Image (cartoon, grey):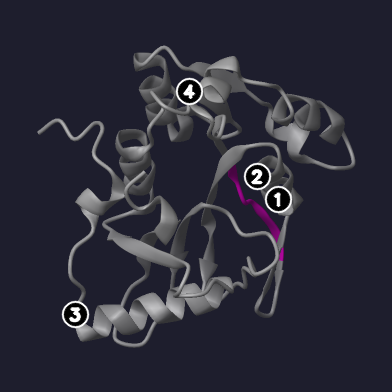
Amino acid sequence: MDRSGASLAYYERPLSSSESQARSAVLQGCGLKESDYSLIFLPNARSGLDIMANAYPFARYPMFLNCLTGAEGKGLTDAAERVKGRVLAAQQTWLNLNIAGSQLSLTIRRKSSRAGAYGGPKGLFAYPLIPTVSKGSQACSRYSLHWISEAQRNGWHVLLDASAISLGMDKLDLSLHRPDYVICNFTQLAGYSSSISCLVFRKSLRSL
Protein backbone atom coordinates (compact mmCIF):
# COMPACT_ATOMS: atom_id res chain seq x y z
CA MET A 1 0.00 0.00 0.00
CA ASP A 2 1.30 3.44 -0.96
CA ARG A 3 1.25 5.57 2.18
CA SER A 4 3.13 8.54 0.77
CA GLY A 5 1.40 11.76 1.74
CA ALA A 6 -0.20 10.25 4.85
CA SER A 7 0.17 12.44 7.93
CA LEU A 8 1.43 11.10 11.25
CA ALA A 9 -2.20 10.84 12.37
CA TYR A 10 -2.52 7.94 9.92
CA TYR A 11 0.05 5.92 11.89
CA GLU A 12 -1.40 6.57 15.34
CA ARG A 13 -3.63 4.05 17.07
CA PRO A 14 -5.38 3.83 20.43
CA LEU A 15 -3.00 2.84 23.22
CA SER A 16 -3.56 0.27 25.92
CA SER A 17 -3.11 1.23 29.56
CA SER A 18 0.42 -0.20 29.62
CA GLU A 19 1.29 1.59 26.38
CA SER A 20 0.01 4.88 27.78
CA GLN A 21 2.25 4.38 30.81
CA ALA A 22 5.15 3.60 28.47
CA ARG A 23 4.45 6.77 26.50
CA SER A 24 4.58 8.81 29.71
CA ALA A 25 7.87 7.19 30.70
CA VAL A 26 9.46 7.83 27.29
CA LEU A 27 8.44 11.48 27.18
CA GLN A 28 9.53 12.02 30.77
CA GLY A 29 12.84 10.35 29.94
CA CYS A 30 13.34 12.88 27.14
CA GLY A 31 12.31 15.84 29.27
CA LEU A 32 9.28 16.52 27.04
CA LYS A 33 5.74 17.38 28.12
CA GLU A 34 2.80 15.12 27.31
CA SER A 35 0.74 18.23 26.66
CA ASP A 36 3.04 19.07 23.74
CA TYR A 37 4.26 15.70 22.43
CA SER A 38 2.94 12.29 21.52
CA LEU A 39 4.55 9.20 20.00
CA ILE A 40 4.12 6.24 17.70
CA PHE A 41 5.48 2.85 18.78
CA LEU A 42 7.69 1.25 16.13
CA PRO A 43 8.90 -2.28 15.31
CA ASN A 44 12.41 -0.78 15.06
CA ALA A 45 14.05 2.62 14.86
CA ARG A 46 14.59 2.42 11.10
CA SER A 47 10.83 2.30 10.51
CA GLY A 48 10.59 5.75 12.10
CA LEU A 49 12.64 7.14 9.22
CA ASP A 50 10.34 5.34 6.77
CA ILE A 51 7.28 6.92 8.40
CA MET A 52 8.87 10.36 8.24
CA ALA A 53 9.68 9.85 4.55
CA ASN A 54 6.02 9.08 3.90
CA ALA A 55 4.51 11.67 6.22
CA TYR A 56 6.64 14.79 5.95
CA PRO A 57 5.06 17.27 3.47
CA PHE A 58 8.06 18.07 1.28
CA ALA A 59 5.67 19.34 -1.41
CA ARG A 60 4.80 22.20 0.97
CA TYR A 61 8.12 22.56 2.80
CA PRO A 62 10.55 21.58 0.05
CA MET A 63 14.04 21.67 1.57
CA PHE A 64 15.76 18.70 3.20
CA LEU A 65 19.01 19.32 5.06
CA ASN A 66 20.48 15.87 5.60
CA CYS A 67 23.16 15.04 8.15
CA LEU A 68 22.20 11.37 8.32
CA THR A 69 24.51 8.82 6.75
CA GLY A 70 23.90 6.38 3.90
CA ALA A 71 20.71 4.37 4.11
CA GLU A 72 19.44 6.33 7.12
CA GLY A 73 18.81 9.42 5.01
CA LYS A 74 17.97 7.78 1.68
CA GLY A 75 14.21 7.46 2.19
CA LEU A 76 13.86 11.10 3.19
CA THR A 77 16.11 12.19 0.32
CA ASP A 78 14.04 10.20 -2.17
CA ALA A 79 10.81 11.64 -0.75
CA ALA A 80 12.06 15.21 -1.15
CA GLU A 81 13.36 14.58 -4.66
CA ARG A 82 10.05 13.02 -5.78
CA VAL A 83 8.35 16.39 -5.34
CA LYS A 84 11.33 18.29 -6.75
CA GLY A 85 12.44 19.45 -3.34
CA ARG A 86 15.94 20.71 -2.69
CA VAL A 87 18.25 18.30 -0.88
CA LEU A 88 21.23 19.78 0.95
CA ALA A 89 23.80 17.24 2.07
CA ALA A 90 25.77 18.26 5.16
CA GLN A 91 28.81 16.40 6.41
CA GLN A 92 28.56 15.13 9.96
CA THR A 93 31.83 16.90 10.76
CA TRP A 94 29.90 20.16 10.31
CA LEU A 95 27.94 19.30 13.45
CA ASN A 96 31.07 19.62 15.57
CA LEU A 97 31.08 23.13 17.01
CA ASN A 98 34.85 22.96 17.43
CA ILE A 99 35.60 22.16 13.78
CA ALA A 100 33.31 23.52 11.10
CA GLY A 101 30.14 24.63 12.81
CA SER A 102 30.13 27.86 10.83
CA GLN A 103 29.58 25.91 7.59
CA LEU A 104 26.45 24.27 8.98
CA SER A 105 25.22 27.61 10.33
CA LEU A 106 25.49 29.13 6.86
CA THR A 107 23.55 26.24 5.37
CA ILE A 108 20.86 26.42 8.05
CA ARG A 109 20.42 30.13 7.32
CA ARG A 110 20.03 29.56 3.58
CA LYS A 111 16.78 30.99 2.28
CA SER A 112 14.10 29.08 0.38
CA SER A 113 11.96 31.03 -2.08
CA ARG A 114 9.46 28.18 -2.37
CA ALA A 115 8.97 27.91 1.37
CA GLY A 116 8.53 31.67 1.55
CA ALA A 117 5.75 31.47 -1.02
CA TYR A 118 3.80 29.19 1.32
CA GLY A 119 4.58 31.34 4.33
CA GLY A 120 5.82 28.36 6.33
CA PRO A 121 8.99 26.52 7.34
CA LYS A 122 11.77 25.80 4.86
CA GLY A 123 11.67 22.06 5.33
CA LEU A 124 13.26 19.33 7.43
CA PHE A 125 16.69 19.21 9.04
CA ALA A 126 17.69 15.71 10.17
CA TYR A 127 20.77 14.80 12.15
CA PRO A 128 21.96 11.99 14.46
CA LEU A 129 22.76 11.99 18.13
CA ILE A 130 25.92 9.92 18.50
CA PRO A 131 27.23 9.14 22.00
CA THR A 132 30.94 9.16 22.71
CA VAL A 133 31.01 8.00 26.33
CA SER A 134 28.47 6.93 28.90
CA LYS A 135 29.00 7.64 32.58
CA GLY A 136 26.30 6.27 34.82
CA SER A 137 23.02 7.49 33.40
CA GLN A 138 24.53 10.39 31.47
CA ALA A 139 25.15 9.97 27.75
CA CYS A 140 27.58 12.46 26.25
CA SER A 141 26.90 13.33 22.64
CA ARG A 142 29.51 14.04 20.01
CA TYR A 143 27.15 16.59 18.46
CA SER A 144 25.54 19.50 20.23
CA LEU A 145 21.79 19.78 20.78
CA HIS A 146 22.34 23.48 20.08
CA TRP A 147 21.63 22.77 16.40
CA ILE A 148 17.99 22.03 17.21
CA SER A 149 17.25 25.54 18.42
CA GLU A 150 19.39 27.24 15.78
CA ALA A 151 17.65 25.38 12.97
CA GLN A 152 14.20 26.13 14.38
CA ARG A 153 15.03 29.82 14.69
CA ASN A 154 15.88 29.77 11.00
CA GLY A 155 12.66 28.15 9.85
CA TRP A 156 13.36 24.40 9.91
CA HIS A 157 11.52 21.48 11.40
CA VAL A 158 14.08 19.28 13.16
CA LEU A 159 14.26 15.48 13.22
CA LEU A 160 16.71 14.13 15.82
CA ASP A 161 17.74 10.51 15.33
CA ALA A 162 18.64 9.47 18.88
CA SER A 163 18.42 5.73 18.20
CA ALA A 164 22.15 5.28 18.87
CA ILE A 165 21.58 5.67 22.61
CA SER A 166 19.35 3.67 24.93
CA LEU A 167 17.03 5.76 27.05
CA GLY A 168 16.52 4.16 30.40
CA MET A 169 20.25 3.50 30.64
CA ASP A 170 21.41 6.75 29.03
CA LYS A 171 19.94 10.20 29.60
CA LEU A 172 18.62 12.51 26.91
CA ASP A 173 17.41 15.88 28.18
CA LEU A 174 15.50 17.73 25.47
CA SER A 175 13.77 20.17 27.80
CA LEU A 176 15.87 23.11 26.57
CA HIS A 177 16.43 22.23 22.90
CA ARG A 178 13.19 20.58 21.83
CA PRO A 179 13.13 18.95 18.39
CA ASP A 180 9.96 18.55 16.37
CA TYR A 181 10.55 14.83 15.84
CA VAL A 182 12.70 12.32 17.73
CA ILE A 183 13.46 8.69 16.91
CA CYS A 184 14.58 6.85 20.03
CA ASN A 185 14.97 3.50 21.76
CA PHE A 186 13.96 2.92 25.37
CA THR A 187 15.20 0.05 27.55
CA GLN A 188 14.48 -1.10 31.11
CA LEU A 189 10.86 -0.02 30.80
CA ALA A 190 8.42 -1.58 33.26
CA GLY A 191 6.25 -4.20 31.58
CA TYR A 192 8.57 -4.66 28.59
CA SER A 193 11.15 -7.44 28.41
CA SER A 194 13.06 -5.83 25.54
CA SER A 195 13.72 -2.33 24.27
CA ILE A 196 11.03 -0.39 22.43
CA SER A 197 11.43 2.06 19.57
CA CYS A 198 9.39 5.23 19.16
CA LEU A 199 8.83 8.19 16.91
CA VAL A 200 8.14 11.16 19.18
CA PHE A 201 6.53 14.22 17.58
CA ARG A 202 4.95 17.53 18.43
CA LYS A 203 1.19 17.23 18.65
CA SER A 204 0.84 20.43 16.64
CA LEU A 205 2.46 18.62 13.68
CA ARG A 206 0.24 15.53 13.85
CA SER A 207 -1.77 16.47 10.76
CA LEU A 208 0.87 18.56 8.99
User: Mark 1 and 2 residues: CB-CB less than 8 Å, in contact?
Assistant: yes
User: Is residue 44 visible from the viewing direction of this image?
Assistant: yes
- Residue 204 vertical position relative to residue 87 in the rendered view, above or below: below
The three-letter amino acid code for the residue at tag 2 is Gln
Residue at image mark 1 = 149
Q: Residue furthest left?
A: 1
Is 158 left or right of 27, judged from the image as shown? right
Q: Within the image, what quadrant is residue 126 found in? A: top right
The three-letter amino acid code for the residue at tag 4 is Pro
Residue at image mark 3 = 16
The three-letter amino acid code for the residue at tag 3 is Ser
Residue at image mark 4 = 62
- Residue 118 vertical position relative to residue 180 in the rendered view, above or below: above
User: Is residue 200 visible from the viewing direction of this image?
Assistant: no
Estimate the spatial distance between the alpha carbons at disc 1 and disc 4, rounded to whole Å. 20 Å
Is 158 left or right of 139, judged from the image as shown? left
User: Mark 1 and 3 residues: CB-CB less than 8 Å, in contact?
Assistant: no
Q: Earlier in the sequence, mark 1 or mark 3?
A: 3
Residue at image mark 2 = 152
Q: Earlier in the sequence, mark 2 or mark 4?
A: 4
Residue at point 71% right, 44% down?
153
Q: Which residues are magenta?
A: 127-133
